[in-house]
Image: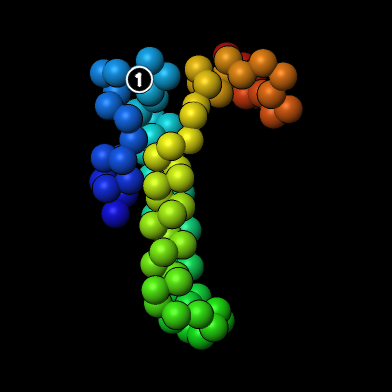
Amino acid sequence: MAAVGRELRPDPDHDPDHDPLDAAMSAYALVSGALELVAVWMRGEFDTARDQLTDLIARQLLQAAEYPRPGGFASRPGDPFPPAAVED
């Protein structure tokens, strides 16, 4: 499923903002969340039909593939949570 998520991302050769690590972490987060959602549904904690669950997961995967990512985390102006400084 993570591989499918990475395949949905734009072609890295045509995306100047492509970050392989960011893509891998995003795929991991999507897969983990989707698997947790399915597990909770299977335990009966969400009273919904399978079709609604699969539609929601599919929409989230497609939405994540469309998410615009400006320039990388460190270069976002006005970011309320800038990366921590690394001390030598």
x 33%, y 45%: residue: 5
Q: Quadrant of residue 27?
A: top left
Name the foreground residue: 6 vs 56. Answer: 56
Q: Position of residue 2 (x, y in %)?
A: 31, 49
Position of residue 45 in the picture relative to residue 30 (left or right): right
Q: Which residue is mark 1?
A: 15
Lateral position of residue 72 relative to residue 27, left or right: right
Q: Nearer the viewer, residue 13 or 40?
A: 13
**Dot 1: few (<14), some (14–19), or many (≥20) neighbours within 10 Å?**
few
Q: Determine whether 68 is above or below 40 in the image.
A: above
Position of residue 77 measured from the top left corner of the image (x, y, whole percent): 67, 16
40 w.r.t. 13: above or below: below
| Quarter of the image where the C terminus is located | top right
Look at the image and tell me whether residue 37 can be seen. Answer: yes
Say how many tags the image has: 1
In the image, 25: left or right of 3? right
Could one spot residue 34 in this view of the protein? no
Q: Position of residue 44 (x, y in %)?
A: 51, 85
Coloration of the structure image: rainbow
**Residue at 43% from the left image edge and 54% from the top image edge:** 59
Residue at 39% from the left image edge and 73% from the top image edge: 51
Residue 15: quadrant of the picture: top left
